[in-house]
Image (cartoon, helix red, strand yellow):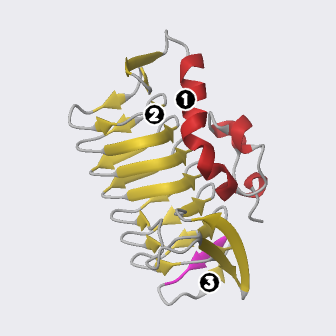
Amino acid sequence: MYTIKEMYDLDHTLAGSYLSQFTYPWEALKGIKELILSLGPTLSKDEYDNPSEGVWIHKSSKVFSSAYLGAPCIIGPETEVRHCAFIRGSALVGANCVVGNSVELKNVILFDHVQTPHYNYVGDSILGYYSHMGAGSITSNVKSDKKLVTIKDNGEIIETGLKKFGAMIGDYVEVGCNAVCNPGTVIGRHSRVYPTSCVRGLIPENCIWKNDGTVVPVRS
Protein backbone atom coordinates (compact mmCIF):
# COMPACT_ATOMS: atom_id res chain seq x y z
CA MET A 1 0.00 0.00 0.00
CA TYR A 2 3.05 2.31 -0.17
CA THR A 3 3.64 2.34 -3.91
CA ILE A 4 3.08 5.50 -5.92
CA LYS A 5 -0.05 4.10 -7.55
CA GLU A 6 -1.50 3.15 -4.17
CA MET A 7 -0.80 6.52 -2.54
CA TYR A 8 -1.38 9.08 -5.30
CA ASP A 9 -3.81 9.94 -8.08
CA LEU A 10 -1.36 10.87 -10.82
CA ASP A 11 -4.01 12.77 -12.78
CA HIS A 12 -3.63 15.65 -10.32
CA THR A 13 -0.04 16.75 -10.92
CA LEU A 14 2.18 17.82 -13.79
CA ALA A 15 4.60 15.19 -12.47
CA GLY A 16 2.28 12.28 -13.29
CA SER A 17 4.31 10.82 -16.15
CA TYR A 18 7.54 11.27 -14.22
CA LEU A 19 6.24 9.60 -11.07
CA SER A 20 4.80 6.67 -13.02
CA GLN A 21 8.36 5.55 -13.83
CA PHE A 22 8.95 4.60 -10.19
CA THR A 23 7.53 2.03 -7.80
CA TYR A 24 7.96 3.89 -4.52
CA PRO A 25 7.58 7.67 -4.16
CA TRP A 26 10.89 8.33 -2.43
CA GLU A 27 12.66 7.01 -5.53
CA ALA A 28 11.52 10.18 -7.33
CA LEU A 29 13.16 12.69 -4.98
CA LYS A 30 16.53 12.84 -6.70
CA GLY A 31 15.10 13.96 -10.04
CA ILE A 32 12.69 16.73 -9.05
CA LYS A 33 15.01 19.56 -10.08
CA GLU A 34 15.62 18.07 -13.52
CA LEU A 35 11.90 17.38 -13.91
CA ILE A 36 11.00 21.03 -13.34
CA LEU A 37 13.72 22.26 -15.68
CA SER A 38 12.39 19.98 -18.41
CA LEU A 39 8.72 20.81 -17.81
CA GLY A 40 9.05 24.57 -17.55
CA PRO A 41 9.97 25.35 -21.17
CA THR A 42 7.04 23.23 -22.39
CA LEU A 43 4.42 25.26 -20.51
CA SER A 44 2.17 27.57 -22.52
CA LYS A 45 3.46 31.13 -22.64
CA ASP A 46 -0.16 32.26 -22.87
CA GLU A 47 -0.83 30.68 -19.47
CA TYR A 48 2.48 30.96 -17.61
CA ASP A 49 4.77 33.89 -16.92
CA ASN A 50 8.51 33.29 -16.80
CA PRO A 51 9.72 36.25 -14.69
CA SER A 52 13.21 34.86 -14.18
CA GLU A 53 15.29 31.95 -15.34
CA GLY A 54 13.88 28.66 -14.08
CA VAL A 55 10.70 30.17 -12.57
CA TRP A 56 7.25 29.64 -14.10
CA ILE A 57 4.11 31.13 -12.55
CA HIS A 58 0.59 30.55 -13.84
CA LYS A 59 -1.10 33.83 -14.67
CA SER A 60 -4.13 32.96 -12.53
CA SER A 61 -2.04 32.39 -9.41
CA LYS A 62 -1.51 35.00 -6.69
CA VAL A 63 2.04 35.53 -5.44
CA PHE A 64 2.55 38.09 -2.69
CA SER A 65 5.33 40.59 -3.31
CA SER A 66 7.14 39.52 -0.13
CA ALA A 67 7.38 35.87 -1.24
CA TYR A 68 10.67 34.46 -2.53
CA LEU A 69 10.59 32.08 -5.49
CA GLY A 70 13.89 30.33 -6.06
CA ALA A 71 14.68 28.46 -9.26
CA PRO A 72 13.66 26.06 -10.45
CA CYS A 73 10.00 26.14 -9.52
CA ILE A 74 6.57 25.95 -11.10
CA ILE A 75 3.50 27.56 -9.50
CA GLY A 76 0.23 26.15 -10.82
CA PRO A 77 -3.16 27.70 -11.64
CA GLU A 78 -5.19 29.46 -8.92
CA THR A 79 -2.47 28.84 -6.33
CA GLU A 80 -1.67 31.37 -3.59
CA VAL A 81 1.90 31.97 -2.44
CA ARG A 82 1.43 34.17 0.59
CA HIS A 83 3.36 36.69 2.67
CA CYS A 84 7.03 35.81 3.25
CA ALA A 85 6.78 32.31 1.77
CA PHE A 86 10.26 30.98 0.96
CA ILE A 87 10.48 28.61 -2.00
CA ARG A 88 14.13 27.64 -2.00
CA GLY A 89 13.93 25.81 -5.31
CA SER A 90 13.11 22.47 -6.89
CA ALA A 91 9.43 22.95 -6.03
CA LEU A 92 6.62 21.81 -8.30
CA VAL A 93 3.43 23.31 -6.85
CA GLY A 94 0.13 22.23 -8.39
CA ALA A 95 -3.20 23.93 -9.01
CA ASN A 96 -5.36 25.48 -6.27
CA CYS A 97 -2.65 25.11 -3.64
CA VAL A 98 -1.82 27.33 -0.67
CA VAL A 99 1.78 28.10 0.26
CA GLY A 100 1.23 30.21 3.31
CA ASN A 101 2.83 32.73 5.61
CA SER A 102 6.51 31.95 6.28
CA VAL A 103 6.23 28.49 4.72
CA GLU A 104 9.47 27.04 3.32
CA LEU A 105 9.53 24.54 0.44
CA LYS A 106 12.56 22.72 -0.92
CA ASN A 107 12.78 19.77 -3.34
CA VAL A 108 9.09 18.94 -3.24
CA ILE A 109 6.13 17.95 -5.36
CA LEU A 110 2.79 19.35 -4.19
CA PHE A 111 -0.16 17.80 -5.98
CA ASP A 112 -3.24 19.90 -6.78
CA HIS A 113 -5.26 21.31 -3.86
CA VAL A 114 -2.46 20.84 -1.30
CA GLN A 115 -2.47 23.25 1.62
CA THR A 116 0.65 24.24 3.55
CA PRO A 117 -0.89 27.42 4.97
CA HIS A 118 0.93 28.44 8.15
CA TYR A 119 4.57 28.21 9.25
CA ASN A 120 5.30 24.84 7.62
CA TYR A 121 8.63 23.43 6.50
CA VAL A 122 8.33 20.87 3.72
CA GLY A 123 11.57 19.48 2.32
CA ASP A 124 12.44 16.44 0.21
CA SER A 125 8.82 15.37 0.30
CA ILE A 126 5.80 14.60 -1.87
CA LEU A 127 2.34 15.76 -0.76
CA GLY A 128 -0.67 14.14 -2.40
CA TYR A 129 -3.95 15.49 -3.76
CA TYR A 130 -5.97 17.45 -1.18
CA SER A 131 -3.45 16.77 1.59
CA HIS A 132 -3.21 19.37 4.34
CA MET A 133 -0.47 20.39 6.78
CA GLY A 134 -1.81 21.98 9.96
CA ALA A 135 -0.23 25.17 11.31
CA GLY A 136 3.36 24.64 12.40
CA SER A 137 3.61 21.04 11.18
CA ILE A 138 6.84 20.15 9.41
CA THR A 139 8.71 17.44 7.59
CA SER A 140 12.11 16.75 9.14
CA ASN A 141 14.29 15.61 6.27
CA VAL A 142 17.73 14.80 7.78
CA LYS A 143 18.52 12.42 10.64
CA SER A 144 20.35 13.87 13.64
CA ASP A 145 23.24 11.44 13.10
CA LYS A 146 23.33 12.38 9.36
CA LYS A 147 23.10 8.71 8.34
CA LEU A 148 21.05 7.47 5.40
CA VAL A 149 17.32 7.46 6.01
CA THR A 150 15.58 4.13 6.50
CA ILE A 151 11.87 3.37 6.77
CA LYS A 152 10.66 1.25 9.66
CA ASP A 153 7.65 -1.01 9.18
CA ASN A 154 6.81 -3.30 12.12
CA GLY A 155 10.42 -4.29 12.66
CA GLU A 156 11.33 -4.41 8.97
CA ILE A 157 13.94 -1.89 7.82
CA ILE A 158 13.60 -0.50 4.28
CA GLU A 159 16.80 1.05 2.95
CA THR A 160 16.27 4.18 0.85
CA GLY A 161 19.87 5.17 0.11
CA LEU A 162 18.90 8.80 0.75
CA LYS A 163 20.45 11.23 3.20
CA LYS A 164 17.57 13.68 2.75
CA PHE A 165 14.04 12.31 2.87
CA GLY A 166 11.17 14.09 4.59
CA ALA A 167 7.72 12.55 4.19
CA MET A 168 5.64 10.84 1.55
CA ILE A 169 2.11 12.01 2.30
CA GLY A 170 -0.75 10.38 0.40
CA ASP A 171 -3.93 11.85 -1.05
CA TYR A 172 -6.39 13.40 1.41
CA VAL A 173 -4.06 13.11 4.41
CA GLU A 174 -4.55 15.50 7.35
CA VAL A 175 -1.47 16.35 9.42
CA GLY A 176 -2.36 18.08 12.69
CA CYS A 177 -0.94 21.34 13.98
CA ASN A 178 2.68 21.30 15.22
CA ALA A 179 3.19 17.66 14.25
CA VAL A 180 6.66 16.56 13.16
CA CYS A 181 7.01 14.00 10.39
CA ASN A 182 10.44 12.51 11.03
CA PRO A 183 12.77 11.43 8.18
CA GLY A 184 11.34 8.44 6.35
CA THR A 185 7.69 8.98 7.27
CA VAL A 186 5.18 7.49 4.82
CA ILE A 187 1.45 8.14 5.31
CA GLY A 188 -1.20 6.30 3.30
CA ARG A 189 -4.30 7.84 1.75
CA HIS A 190 -7.07 9.30 3.91
CA SER A 191 -5.08 8.97 7.13
CA ARG A 192 -4.79 11.54 9.91
CA VAL A 193 -2.09 12.63 12.32
CA TYR A 194 -2.99 14.08 15.72
CA PRO A 195 -1.70 17.58 16.54
CA THR A 196 1.71 17.79 18.29
CA SER A 197 2.55 14.20 17.28
CA CYS A 198 6.07 12.96 16.57
CA VAL A 199 5.56 10.66 13.60
CA ARG A 200 7.87 8.09 12.09
CA GLY A 201 7.68 4.98 9.91
CA LEU A 202 4.72 3.77 7.88
CA ILE A 203 1.11 4.69 8.59
CA PRO A 204 -1.40 2.60 6.59
CA GLU A 205 -4.20 4.25 4.66
CA ASN A 206 -7.43 5.12 6.49
CA CYS A 207 -5.73 5.22 9.88
CA ILE A 208 -5.15 7.69 12.70
CA TRP A 209 -1.77 8.29 14.34
CA LYS A 210 -2.36 9.33 17.96
CA ASN A 211 0.00 11.36 20.15
CA ASP A 212 1.40 8.28 21.90
CA GLY A 213 2.27 6.60 18.59
CA THR A 214 -0.76 4.32 18.59
CA VAL A 215 -2.22 3.73 15.13
CA VAL A 216 -5.92 2.91 14.87
CA PRO A 217 -8.29 2.56 11.90
CA VAL A 218 -10.55 5.46 10.99
CA ARG A 219 -14.08 4.66 12.08
CA SER A 220 -16.59 4.73 9.26
Residue 16 drawn at (x, y percent) = 70, 38
Q: Mark 2 and 1 residues: CB-CB less than 8 Å, in contact?
A: yes
Which residue shows up at 54% across the image and 24% down it? 40
Q: Quadrant of residue 33?
A: top right
Residue 54 drawn at (x, y percent) = 44, 26
Mark 1 residue element? helix
**Residue type highlighted by circle 3:** Val
- Residue 81 part of the magenta-drawn span: no
Which residue shows up at 65% across the image and 75% down it? 151
Residue 75 falls left or right of residue 68: right
- Identify the image quadrant of the N terminus: bottom right
Q: Earlier in the sequence, mark 3 or mark 1?
A: 1
Mark 3 residue element? strand
Frontmost residue, 59 versus 31: 31
How far is the residue under mark 2 from the one under mark 3? 37 Å
Residue at mark 3:
215
Residue 120 drawn at (x, y percent) = 36, 58
How far is the residue under mark 3 from the one under mark 1? 39 Å
Counting every numbered tag in the picture gives 3
Which residue shows up at 66% across the image and 80% down it? 152
Checking the image for residue 37, the label placed there is: 1
> In this rendering, does residue 205 appear at all?
no
How far is the residue under mark 2 from the one under mark 1? 6 Å
**Residue type highlighted by circle 2:** Pro
Which span is picked out in magenta? 205-210
Q: Earlier in the sequence, mark 2 or mark 1?
A: 1
